[in-house]
Amino acid sequence: MGLISFLKQAAAGHTAGQTQARYDRANARANDYMEVAQWFAEEGEGNPPILQTYQQLAALPFRQGHAAKLVGYRNDIERKLGHARHIGTKQNPWIAAYQRPADGTVYCAYVLLRDNNQQFALMKPYWFLSSGETEAGYRRSVTSVI
């Protein structure tokens, strides 16, 4: 492969190393999401609410101070929700909001996207944790139940 060809591929993100790095990041996001979902399945009741807009997420109960944190995430969440329109999928993106079983307040929200081939893309999680809480406290290994 010539230098010019390699530089074009690198600029477009199509080298083998860049492709593998994208797959690794996607796998890590999927594993993180499955651990959060596993904890909720074992500790919570029912399914997490599936929301279509930021406004629906903002209407859910949050602990004191966390609503302000949500406002700080607003542009990022709306940008991710708008990403589906940009890539032209026929599916809607959605937000999975995980709520604490004890008081019903939101502790984590994930923005998800499904493409035309029913492939899921997990985007960034948004955590709303109080002092003394950790992300690890709301995760459970998926392989521990096998």
Image (cartoon, rainbow, N blue to C red):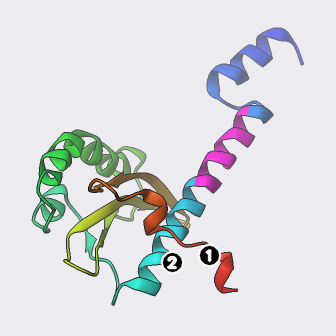
Which structural element holds mark 2? helix
Dot 2 and dot 1 residues touching (CB under 8 Å): yes
* Residue 20: in magenta span: yes
Separation of residues labelled 2 and 1 (CA atoms): 6 Å
Residue pictured at 33% horizontal, 89% vertical: 45
Task: Decide which of 120, 106 is in the foreground and name it.
Answer: 106
Q: Split into 4 quadrants, where in the image is the N terminus?
A: top right
The magenta region covers 18-28
Indicate which disc residue 38 carries: 2
Identity of the residue drawn at 77% across and 33% down:
17
From the viewer's perspective, tell me whether residue 40 is left or right of residue 108.
right
Q: Quadrant of the C terminus?
A: bottom right
Q: Secondary structure at mark 1?
A: loop
Percent position (x, y) of residue 128?
Answer: 28, 55
Left or right side of 65 for 100 = right
User: Residue 94 sits in which quadrant?
Assistant: bottom left
Task: Note whether 3 is above or below 138 in the view shown.
Answer: above
* Mark identifier at residue 17: none
The crowd level at tag 1 (other Cα within 10 Å; few <14, some 14-19, many 20+) is some
Residue type, numbered disc 1: Val
- Residue 31 screen position, x and y as percent: 60, 62
x, y (%) of residue 18?
71, 33
| Amino acid type of the residue that numbered disc 2 sits on in the rendered structure | Gln
98 is within the stretch colored magenta = no
Look at mark 1 in the image and give the residue it sits on.
142
